[in-house]
Amino acid sequence: MLPGSCANHPERAAAAICVSCRKAVCAECATQWDGLHHCVACLARRREQARGPKARLSWLGLLLLIPALTYLGSWALVWTTLRVAELLE
């Protein structure tokens, strides 16, 4: 056990130190990621950074892809209908 008390729960003994903010945290508040202890706030910030722009870019790509596929599908349907109509004449 580490000396001191948890930054979030003063009545509990500290079990780890967050590698980002250096706060002492209890076993319930400490989470290991890549073998290192993080507090809840730093872990949330780190997860958001890990998602970051990649998630936004994938949504943007999807939003651009849907109308393009809809347009191409509609165009293919019209083209096919016209070709079939020519064959039936």
Image: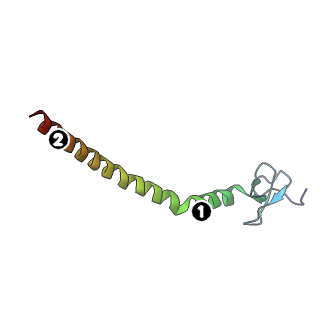
**Element assignment for label 2:** helix
**Residue at x-position 64% and y-position 56%:** 44
Q: Quadrant of residue 82?
A: top left
Disc nearer the start of the sequence (1/2):
1
Amino acid type indicated by mark 1 = Gln
Residue 9 tag number: none
**Residue at x-position 75% and y-position 52%:** 29
From the top left corner, tell me how far across and down residue 30 is, in percent.
Answer: 77, 54
Which residue is label 1 attached to? 49
**Residue at x-position 87% and y-position 60%:** 4
Mark 1 Cα-neighbour bin, 10 Å: few <14, some 14–19, many ≥20: few
Mark 2 Cα-neighbour bin, 10 Å: few <14, some 14–19, many ≥20: few
From the top left corner, tell me how far across and down residue 48 is, in percent.
Answer: 59, 59
From the top left corner, tell me how far across and down residue 56 is, in percent.
Answer: 47, 58
Which residue is label 2 attached to? 83
Task: Give the position of the N terminus as an image quadrant.
Answer: bottom right
For the residues bearing labels 1 and 2, Cβ distance under 8 angstroms: no
